[in-house]
Amino acid sequence: MSMKPNPLPGVPNVESPFFDQLFAEGTTPPELRSIALSLARDGYAVIDFPDEDISGMADRIRADLHDRYDWEARAAGRGADMRLQDAWKFNDDVRRIAVNPNIINLLSELYGRKAWPFQTLNFPVGTQQHFHTDSVHFSSMPERYMCGVWVALEDIGPDQGPVIYYPGSHRWPIYTNEHIGYRPTRARTTQMVYEGLWSQLVAASGIQPKTLTIKKGQALIWLANLMHGGDIHLSHEKTRWSHVTHYFFEGCVYYTPMNSDVPGGLVDIRSPYNIILDTHAQNASLGRPLRREYLDAIAATSYFAAEPEDDFDPAAYLLANPDVAAAGEDAYAHWIKHGRDEGRPLKLI
């Protein structure tokens, strides 16, 4: 790769206007350059997952997670949530996929910053989810330092609710609340407020969706702003086992745009968990950690702190989280700054 100084260190290398300099032919390993070219052009790349035991890992994940889903509710059409978040906490194979060193090194080379996983999702069937960009759900400052790696845990055909994606849509601007004239309300924002815009953008662009038919053990890398979703699951008797890891990159501020009004001072800053280091990541800007005074001020004046959730019971939260009580921390302030992202219980069950 080129050793020339990068004029835009705050833009992922793979999305930089200086791509040809950063991934110069002849100095960049051919396989890396091929993946980088695919990502820069289309917003995605398909690779073989770099672990010789991926087939065995896939089989073990399917067997171990099977009974954690409500198959009866799905069969009865009762809207079962057929996704499992952060199974890495109890399943070694899920964690092994998420922290795969070859994937970490590849993403770090592509972006020019160290990659680290912060979330896993496991699906036994297709999501049929409206196409969307991950950039409204979890983003960074500077923007675009996030990506997803989707792994097929079985062969997936066109009737199993495969992933759909819109090649080239990653190059569109990242549209957030200030662009669509939306201010977060008392209820948490959902992506439904953006779906009309996304549909019109797709129609105006003329981009046709592609369907991901893929072999067990292959992986799809997608960039932060690529439009993607789930196609109709035509054969309900068939499964569509898959694994997704979402990655951030070091040296950024991490936040949720659809819960924020940045110009208005409402910033839903995240405290994502670095699965590799087994600790919460530090928010940083231009090489310096954000000051604790600033983070406390943001938490105290954010939308969610200013207008507490109606059902939040401070006493119940402290009872369910005795370490917070022992530390003498304010219950709601802790929930906003840490507890929500840590998945802490609001009350004893």
Image (cartoon, rainbow, N blue to C red):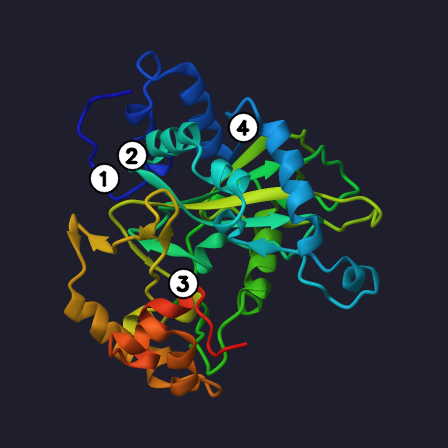
Residue 128 in view: no
Mark 3 and mark 4 lie on one chain; the one further toward the N terminus is 4
Judge whether 246 appears above or below 343 on screen.
Answer: above
Q: Quadrant of the N terminus?
A: top left
Q: Nearer the viewer, residue 81 or 212?
A: 81
Q: Are marks 3 and 1 in contact (CB under 8 Å)?
A: no
Name the secondary structure under disc 2: loop
Q: Which residue is mark 1?
A: 9
Indicate the quadrant containing the C terminus: top left, top right, bottom left or bottom right.
Answer: bottom right
- What SS does tag 1 mark? loop
Q: Amino acid at mark 1?
A: Pro
Q: x and y percent of residue 100 in the render?
A: 44, 33
Amino acid type at image mark 2: Gly
- The residue most toward the top is 26
- Of the numbered discs 2 and 3, the one sitting upstream in the chain is 2
Specify the quadrant of the image occupied by residue 295. Answer: bottom left
* Residue 194 locus on image (x, y percent): 53, 65
Label 1 packing within 10 angstroms: few (<14), some (14-19), many (20+): some
Q: Nearer the viewer, mark 2 or mark 1?
A: 2
Q: Dot 2 corresponds to which residue?
A: 112
Question: Which of 90/194 is in front?
Answer: 90
As helix, strand or loop, the secondary structure at mark 4 comes to loop
Q: Residue at x 49, y 75 (%)?
A: 188
First reached walking from the N terminus: tag 2 or tag 1 = 1
Q: Nearer the viewer, mark 3 or mark 4?
A: 3
Res 111 quadrant in image: top left
Q: Distance between the Cα atoms at labels 2 and 1? A: 8 Å
Kindly identify the residue that appears in the image at 66 percent across and 50 percent down: 230
Task: Tell me the tag on residue 49.
Answer: 4
Which x, y percent locates residue 169? 51, 45
Rate crowding at label 4 as few (under 14), some (14 to 19) or many (20 or more) other CA atoms within 10 Å: many
